[in-house]
Amino acid sequence: MTDQLAFTQENRVRIQAVESSFGPSSKSLSRAGRVLVGEGRLMKLSRKGPQPKVFFLFNDMLVYGSIILHGRWHKKQQVIPLEHIQLEDLEDGLRMKNQWLIRTPRKSFYVGAASHEEKRAWIEHIEDCRARWVRNAGLQPRSDFATTWIPDHASAICMRCSDRFTVTQRRHHCRHCGFVVCGSCSKKRAVIRHIHPVKPVRVCRLCHAGLLAQEEGQPRVRGDSDAKNGSDDDVTVPDDEAYSDEDEGEESMDAHAPNRWLDSQMNWSPYVYLKPDHQVPH
């Protein structure tokens, strides 16, 4: 009984500390049965290159955000239910080592750890927590995941019309195919329901035509790869930005610190599970 009370109190304090670190705009993280399994810093590949982010793994969700004030405070909190996550192991890339892919319905992104051991610990812990959560809660895992964006640096030209990118000819991403495209080739908007149920998002003209055909029950229109030759009869919206807040205003941070995992005595130490069953002691 003493161990159970100590665990419950320590877990509650740690969850409240995570919630407080995101300030008044934080979503409420405290809930009966929720356990903080571990935390650490990972590099997340954004439009500006790899950026350090803080990640918190709970037994039912993954929370991450930007780091400010040397890790004492965080902002731009993102909460992902574990049943909405799919992981894919990857080889080392040119810009990030020890990387893997996190797929979610709204957005898919690359992350990298400080070492191969940390990478394996993160992947194993997330997948184990996800499997237990889905099984114990009787949930159906999601299967509709957002397309992974092709990084900005991977193409010097629009991948639809082949126009070269310049200071004024900016890069954009089609939310449906993930291609790097110019503004002229991505003026269309379409609702992609697993990204947002009602809000139209930026898509290239080729994907826009295909999505319209799907809605009308027609065969998918492949179209010409030169999207500027397509019809412009469809309604367009202003050429505004639709990137998520987390990719804007990245701060320059310290190199990432070692990840920390909670052991059964609630001490932070590398690569150690909280409890095999992610439950309070009995």
Image (cartoon, helix red, strand yellow):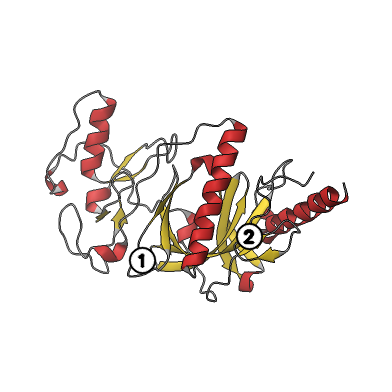
- Residue 77 visible to an observer of this rendering: no
* Image height of 190 relative to 36, above or below: above
* Image height of 169 relative to 227, above or below: below
Q: Circle 1 is placed at which residue position? A: 92
Relative placement, left or right, of 249 versus 234 is: right
Q: Residues within 10 Å of mark 2 (few under 14, many from 20)?
A: some
Identity of the residue drawn at 62% across and 60% down:
39
Give how far across and how far down residue 237 sits, in percent. Answer: 33, 44
- Residue 83 visible to an observer of this rendering: yes
Give how far across and how far down residue 254 sits, in percent. Answer: 55, 76
Which one is in front, 218 or 36? 36
Write down the quadrant of residue 243 in the picture: bottom left
Please tell me which of labels 2 and 1 falls first in the chain. Answer: 1
Q: Residues within 10 Å of mark 1 (few under 14, many from 20)?
A: few
* Image height of 58 relative to 68, above or below: above
Give how far across and how far down residue 236 sits, in percent. Answer: 29, 41
Give how far across and how far down residue 146 sits, in percent. Answer: 38, 44
Q: Circle 2 is placed at which residue position? A: 272
